[in-house]
Amino acid sequence: MRHVIALDVGGTGMKAALVGTDGTLLHEARRATGRKRGADAVVETILAFAAELRAHGEEHLGESAVAAGVAVPGIVDAEKGIAVYAANLGWRDVPLRALLAERIGVPVALGHDVRTGGLAEGRIGAGRGTDRFLFVPLGTGIAGAIGIAGAIEAGAHGDAGEIGHIVVRPDGPDCSCGQRGCLETLASAAAVTRAWAAASGDPEADAADCAKAVESGDPAAIRVWQDAIDALAAGLVTALTLLDPGTLIIGGGLAEAGETLFTPLRAAVEERITFQKLPRIVPAALGDTAGCLGAGLLAWDLLSTEVSA
């Protein structure tokens, strides 16, 4: 059965799959990155994992994978196939595409994790059938993927979509990027966790606990939650003013709160727009499989490009 290898590399773990021509997940597997053993060990873990996936395909699907796609965090030069920088993995200028191609003997596509997940959501997930969309996962940080006609816009320098670093409150908290009041310091799952831990007096409380407290009517939780939603709406209105997407797809940990997030968020965005057209605001559909599915799409796209060339 014709298939590709798909790898989604995170800060602590990797999700992998063998993906068929129609996007079907034929085999799934997970593995720790082993980042505590250092950057080189992470790279070797990825290479070994890919080789195991290739062998699995040969044994159980009757043939070897025809290509591979890999999604990684941080700064990525997809054109050159280099993982330029990833703080949580200790990477600098890792020629990951070349290393993988040498190890498993097939063409390899490399992509940024959020843009790769956005590619999957746009083509086969919540944005299916939409010509222009913006995918925004709300996790430890906030990033974005700009979808245009079935592809993801990377920008002139590979940095397009960094919506988390739109300044929404200039007097807000310091951000690791050097600015103050960036969206992700106020509306990410990590930001809500910090705010609710402080407000509740429970250092172990997190964003999911805050959402549950909101649902039970806790006034302090409602204040924390609404503050995050107000900041998020401000950042999203800036993004839709610039990009005019038809669909706004919200994913990540905060989106797991369902309508506890989406009902007030839709209202807050609608309240702020003036001349802008209100996009559909919908939850992501693929969950934590988006990165893997997107990596598979990158691999199939790479093959179709090589054939057409």
Image: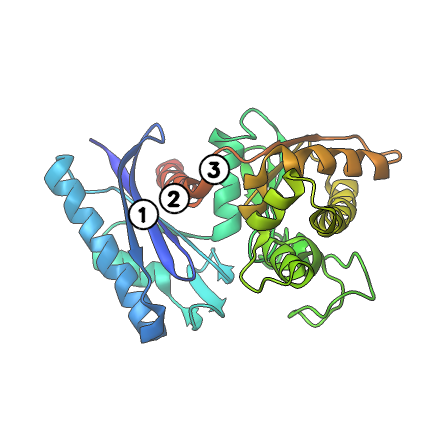
User: For the residue marked with disc 1, what is the amino acid?
Assistant: Ala
Cα separation, mark 3 vs mark 1, equals 15 Å
Answer with mark 3 or mark 1, whichever residue precedes in sequence. Answer: 1
Question: In the rendering, which numbered label is found on residue 16?
Answer: 1
Q: Is residue 272 left or right of residue 45?
A: right
Q: Dot 3 lies on which element?
A: helix
Mark 1 in CB contact with mark 2 (< 8 angstroms)? yes
The C terminus sits in image quarter:
top left
Residue 36 or 125: which is nearer the viewer? 36
Q: Is residue 171 left or right of residue 279?
A: right
Q: Is residue 78 left or right of residue 16?
A: right
Q: Quadrant of residue 215?
A: top right
The N terminus sits in image quarter:
top left
Label 3 CA crowd tier, 10 Å (few <14, some 14–19, many 20+): many
Answer with mark 3 or mark 2, whichever residue precedes in sequence. Answer: 3
- In the image, residue 99 lies at what x, y percent? 30, 63
Question: In the rendering, which numbered label is found on residue 120?
Answer: 3
Label 3 vs label 1, nearer the camera: 1
Answer with mark 1 or mark 2, whichever residue precedes in sequence. Answer: 1
Cα separation, mark 1 vs mark 2, equals 6 Å
Q: Is residue 28 visible?
A: yes
User: For the residue marked with disc 2, what is the amino acid?
Assistant: Cys
- In the image, residue 66 lies at what x, y percent? 25, 42
Q: Dot 1 lies on which element?
A: strand
| Residue occupying the point 36% across, 62% down | 96
- In the image, residue 129 lies at what x, y percent? 56, 24
Q: Is residue 256 left or right of residue 61?
A: right
